[in-house]
């Protein structure tokens, strides 16, 4: 009799253990499958009428954002201006030293952080977490609808043989191209009525951790992007 009770108790415990294990397994599968998930971006907008000269006239740093969401079309256009493919040969909207493909652009927003894949014009998820509040040293960064993260991947140089460049020179190239990217993003934002700011005061360690960067991938700048108050561009 006692043996029967013990056996039943053990069975109950086993079935609960089994249920909990299955639930944990399902949670892990669900979380795991989200990482690496890709989403196709819409085509780049071709209906923007503002001239480059007018956009340059408007360009300024804006640090106050409204809660207007950046639409998928607008994000696609901003990312393409930042580091998109603009020619058959795969080269980009910004110049790179010796043709080396060393820039990586990430997008941090409320639904997680994503890596921009220029070749396919897609986003690839790198985390489910909203990291906007953790990656900049200034409070206004977290108020932006999304934040671009500009990363220099020095490992891209190892693919180019026969060129001996110091680490400083390589990093200088990353900063130079980041400047071009930042200006493109500024002009595109001005033309679509969003505000942005190029920011060097970043939390490198947090960015590295959240984006799972390799040692040779160096975060250089972030650019929060959000809607603007009326008159911000006057
Ligand atoms: C390389 C670089 C780094 C910058 N870093 C920051 C920063 O960390 N935080 C910030 O609020 N603005 C930053 N800025 C924006 C400048 O403060 C801003 O461009 C400058 O005040 C001129 O204003 P304007 O962009 O409206 O012409 C940076 C700009 C550049 C070019």
Image (cartoon, helix red, strand yellow):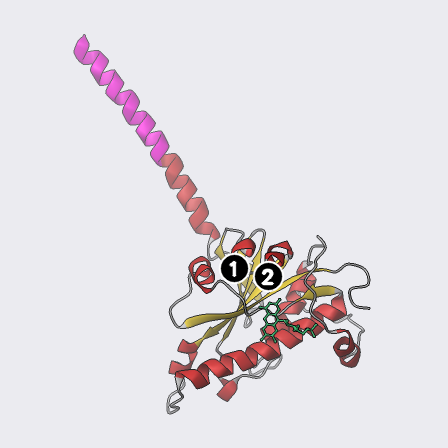
Q: Position of residue 110 (x, y in %)?
A: 59, 51
Residue 15 sits inside the magenta stretch: yes
- Where does the magenta region start and end? 1-21
Q: Tell me the SS state at disc 1.
A: loop
**Relative to 76, does residue 187 appear above or below in the rendering?**
below
Judge from the rendering whether residue 198 lies leftward or rightward of residue 66; answer left or right. Answer: left
Residue 213 sits inside the magenta stretch: no
The residue nearer to you, when weighing 11 against 154, is 154
Q: Which residue is mark 2?
A: 147
Judge from the rendering whether residue 184 lies leftward or rightward of residue 29; answer left or right. Answer: right
Q: Which residue is mark 1?
A: 135
Dots 2, 1 in contact, CB < 8 A? yes
**Relative to 23, does residue 107 appear above or below in the rendering?**
below
Rendered residue at 58%/84% (across/down): 95
Q: Earlier in the sequence, mark 2 or mark 1?
A: 1
- The extreme top residue here reads 1
Quarter of the image that includes the C terminus: bottom right
């Amino acid at each position: 009799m006692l043996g029967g009770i013990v056996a039943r108790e053990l069975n109950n415990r086993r079935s609960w253990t089994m249920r909990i294990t299955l639930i944990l397994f399902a949670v892990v599968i669900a979380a795991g499958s989200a990482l690496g998930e890709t989403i196709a971006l819409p085509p780049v907008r071709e209906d923007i009428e503002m001239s480059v000269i007018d956009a340059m006239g408007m360009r300024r740093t804006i640090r106050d954002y409204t809660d207007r969401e950046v639409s998928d079309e607008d994000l696609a256009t901003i990312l393409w201006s930042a580091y998109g493919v603009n020619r058959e040969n795969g080269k980009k909207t910004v110049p790179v030293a010796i043709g080396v493909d060393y820039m990586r652009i990430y997008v941090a927003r409320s639904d997680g952080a994503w890596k921009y894949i220029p070749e396919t014009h897609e986003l690839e998820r790198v985390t489910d977490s909203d990291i906007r509040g953790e990656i900049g040293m200034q409070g206004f960064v977290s108020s932006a609808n999304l934040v671009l993260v500009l990363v220099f991947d020095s490992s891209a140089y190892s693919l180019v043989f026969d060129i001996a460049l110091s680490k400083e020179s390589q990093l200088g190239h990353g900063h130079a191209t980041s400047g071009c990217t930042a200006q493109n993003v500024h002009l595109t934002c001005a033309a679509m009525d969003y505000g942005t700011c190029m920011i060097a005061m970043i939390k490198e360690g947090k960015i590295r951790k959240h984006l799972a960067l390799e040692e040779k991938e160096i975060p250089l700048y972030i650019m929060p992007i959000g809607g603007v108050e009326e008159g911000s561009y006057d």
